[in-house]
Amino acid sequence: MPAAKRTPRTKTNAKPPTQTSTTTVVTVRRQGGARVMTLPPAVLAAIGADTGTDLTLAVQDGTLVATPVAKRKRRYTLAELLEGAEHLPALYADTAKALEGPPVGDEIG
C-alpha cells in the first residue's frame, strides 16, 4: 500500500521569513586568556563573511549580532608608492638613446 502524502501544516499567524535563518549550536571555550567559538562555514556564508573577515559584534536584546565590516581600500602615500624607485633615474639614463637612430627591424615608427 503506497504511503499517503503529507501536506505541510502552516500556522495562520506565522510571518513569512524575511531571511534564511540558520541555527547552529557552538560552544564557547577558553583559548589562552580569551573565550572563543568556532563559526561554521554555513553561518559565515549566511552573513557574507569568510576567513579573515572583520566582524562588528553587537548585543541587541540579549542576542549577539555579527555584521561583516566593509573593507576600506588601502590608501598609499606618495613616499610609499615611490619606495624602491631610487634606481629609475639611472635606468632612464641608460635607455635614453633607445629611440634614436633608424629602425632595425619591424618597429612601428
Image (cartoon, grey):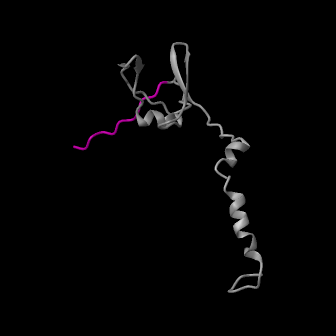
Displayed quadrant of residue 57: top right
Q: Position of residue 88 (x, y in %)?
A: 69, 58
Q: Compared to 92, does 48 lie above or below?
A: above
**Residue with the most extreme left position:** 1
Seen at 70% across and 61% down, the residue is 90
- Along the line of sight, which residue is nearer the eye, 95 or 69? 95
Q: Position of residue 7 (x, y in %)?
A: 39, 35
Q: Compared to 65, does 51 lie above or below?
A: below
- Along the line of sight, which residue is nearer the eye, 82 or 44? 82
Magenta-colored span: 1-11
Left or right: residue 8 versus residue 70 is left
Seen at 66% across and 47% down, the residue is 83
- Dominant SS of magenta comes to loop
Which quarter of the rendering shows the N terminus? top left
- Along the line of sight, which residue is nearer the eye, 60 or 93? 93
Q: Position of residue 69 (x, y in %)?
A: 59, 31
Q: Is residue 22 magenta?
A: no
